[in-house]
Image: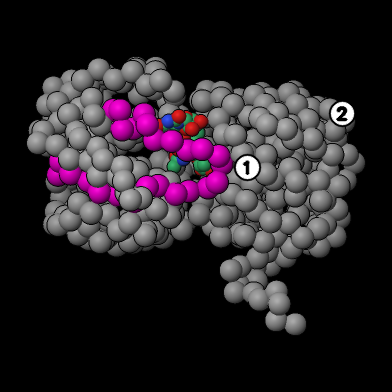
């Protein structure tokens, strides 16, 4: 296990380059199972979720190699198994995309029940309902999901809840199905549009990604020997925007897509921060005040749940009381207990948290409970008085590439202690 030791009181200043989007990459890599031949993916984040996914793809028979730091060459010509290793797939959430992709390719998939961050109940009933509507039989037992069919036939599917995972999974399962699939009440996140763009670039016929309804006309094959670049990470961009405000800093964020950030940009301006947007850069500058604001997380284009903890750190330092209402995950306030150890005044009950702003956070031993909580607590350690020990940083490594290097370039003082043993002395 690794931990961070963070010397605090830092005002973050300088430039940072955003990596490719985790939640797009973990869907596009399984999507290559639908392609005949070789796909080259560029701007792939070098993070642990991507590495595990590559190992699983290799077990299925794919040939995968990193041809540069951020480029993956994936050859799916010789896929020889539809059984994804249960121990590996149950380690992380995005393994559910292997069901849609394998079903689309081979009409059969067996995957461990997906794991992932502990954010509360994470059902997959909408995925299953969709696969069944296309003609698959789905069995969930003994910790695994098995989906089989003789053929997939396009169908209308109305989702009861707006789900990122179910939307992408049903796109994957239907691109090679016979006839037309119409997905209604879908999610509209930038990574959904990116998955559709990738599949269309290799010959799929997907229309409407980014709106409430997606229409997929099945095609007979997708053609490889193609290069595609993954979209920049919306959540990493927002993490640095929040870090600029929380640290009273000034950060120029490069290689991002500013319009993906509209909901956060609006809140930063409401808080009194300065935001300067150019083509693919955003500069966020603290302007001597953090006004309290209220937010409610919601599917895109609403405020992203994956940025709620990072904004929570900013609001713990606002000049007054703010309220956050979490609209997606019931257990996303676990980080507030850690911030309270650092002197924050947050009362979290159910899906609502009240933040009474304080002047300063102070260092404490703190524990990340999930990926975005980890990012938020890292920001808290960077700005707090004193030396913070941040544990469970393997969560952060799942989704942020070279996070401590990026923050160090902005002035943070962070050391990674690898394989520590706290009881050694
Ligand atoms: C994706 O999770 C992301 N993960 C999450 O990011 C993100 O928090 C979430 O979308 C919401 O934006 C990946 O993309 C790999 P959902 P996902 O299906 O697909 C309910 C991060 O930190 N629901 O959109 O699992 C569900 O309980 C991670 O990067 C059902 O009821 O989320 C939740 O309340 C954490 N039935 C809501 O829908 C279903 O079948 C949204 O979940 C599916 C979902």
Q: For residue 239, which numbered disc appears in the image?
A: 1
Give the class, few, some or many, for how many residues have Cα within 10 Å of label 1's Cα (few <14, many ≥20): many
Q: Secondary structure at mark 2?
A: loop
Q: For residue 249, which numbered disc appears in the image?
A: none
Left or right: 172, with 203 as reference point: right
Q: Position of residue 161 (x, y in %)?
A: 44, 23
Q: Is residue 116 magenta?
A: yes
Q: Which residues are magenta?
A: 106-130
Q: Position of residue 139 (x, y in %)?
A: 26, 40
Looking at this rendering, what residue extends furthest in the bottom direction? 425
Residue 42 visible in rendering: no
Q: Quadrant of the N terminus?
A: bottom right
Looking at this rendering, what residue extends furthest in the right direction? 359
Q: Position of residue 399 (x, y in %)?
A: 51, 51
Left or right: 291, with 421 as reference point: right
Tell which of 88 and 16 is nearer to you.
88
Give the class, few, some or many, for how many residues have Cα within 10 Å of label 2's Cα (few <14, many ≥20): some
Q: Quadrant of the C terminus?
A: bottom right
Q: Secondary structure at mark 1?
A: helix
Q: Quadrant of residue 154?
A: top left
Q: CA distance from mark 1 to mark 2?
A: 22 Å
Q: Is residue 386 magenta?
A: no
Q: Quadrant of residue 417?
A: bottom right
Q: Quadrant of residue 247?
A: top right
The correct choice, above or below, for 184 with respect to 338 in the image is above
Q: For residue 320, which numbered disc appears in the image?
A: 2
Q: Position of residue 143 (x, y in %)?
A: 36, 50
What residue do we see at 33% from left, 56% from top? 86
Counting labels gives: 2
What residue do we see at 37% from left, 47% from top? 113
């Amino acid at each position: 296990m690794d931990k961070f030791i963070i010397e605090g009181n830092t005002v973050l200043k300088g430039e940072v380059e955003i990596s490719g989007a985790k939640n797009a990459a973990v869907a596009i890599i399984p999507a290559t199972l639908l392609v005949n031949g070789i796909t080259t993916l560029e701007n792939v984040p070098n993070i642990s979720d991507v590495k595990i996914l590559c190992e699983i793809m290799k077990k299925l028979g794919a040939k995968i190699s990193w041809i540069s730091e951020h480029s993956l060459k994936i050859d799916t010509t010789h896929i020889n198994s539809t059984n994804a290793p249960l121990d590996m797939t149950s380690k992380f959430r995005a393994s559910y995309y292997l069901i849609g992709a394998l079903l689309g390719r081979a009409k059969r998939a067996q995957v461990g029940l997906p794991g992932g961050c502990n954010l509360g109940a994470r059902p997959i009933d909408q995925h299953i309902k969709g696969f069944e509507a296309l003609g698959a039989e789905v069995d969930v037992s003994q910790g695994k999901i098995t989906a089989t069919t003789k053929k997939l036939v396009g169908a209308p599917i109305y989702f009861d809840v707006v789900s990122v995972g179910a939307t992408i999974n049903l796109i994957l399962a239907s691109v090679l199905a016979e006839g037309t699939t119409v997905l209604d009440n879908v999610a509209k996140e930038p990574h959904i549009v990116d998955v559709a763009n990738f599949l269309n670039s290799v010959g799929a016929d997907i229309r409407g990604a980014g709106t409430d309804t997606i229409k997929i006309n099945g095609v007979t094959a997708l053609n490889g020997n193609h290069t595609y670049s993954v979209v920049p990470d919306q959540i990493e961009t927002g993490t640095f925007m929040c870090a600029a405000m929380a640290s009273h800093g000034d950060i120029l964020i490069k290689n991002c897509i500013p319009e993906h950030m509209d909901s956060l940009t609006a809140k930063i301006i409401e808080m009194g921060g300065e935001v300067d947007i150019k083509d693919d850069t955003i500069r966020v500058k603290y302007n001597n005040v953090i006004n309290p604001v209220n937010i409610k997380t919601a599917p895109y284009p609403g405020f992203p749940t994956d940025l709620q903890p990072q904004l929570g750190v900013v609001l713990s330092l606002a000049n007054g009381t703010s309220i956050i209402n979490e609209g997606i995950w019931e257990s996303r306030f676990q980080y507030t207990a850690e911030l309270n150890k650092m002197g924050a005044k947050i009362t979290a009950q159910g899906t609502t948290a009240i933040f009474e702003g304080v002047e300063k956070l102070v260092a404490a031993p703190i524990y990340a409970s999930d990926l975005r909580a980890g990012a938020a607590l890292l920001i808290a350690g960077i700005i707090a008085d004193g030396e913070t020990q941040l544990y469970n940083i393997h969560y952060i490594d799942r989704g942020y590439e070279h996070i401590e290097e990026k923050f160090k370039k902005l002035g943070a003082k962070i050391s990674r202690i690898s394989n520590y043993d706290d009881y050694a002395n």
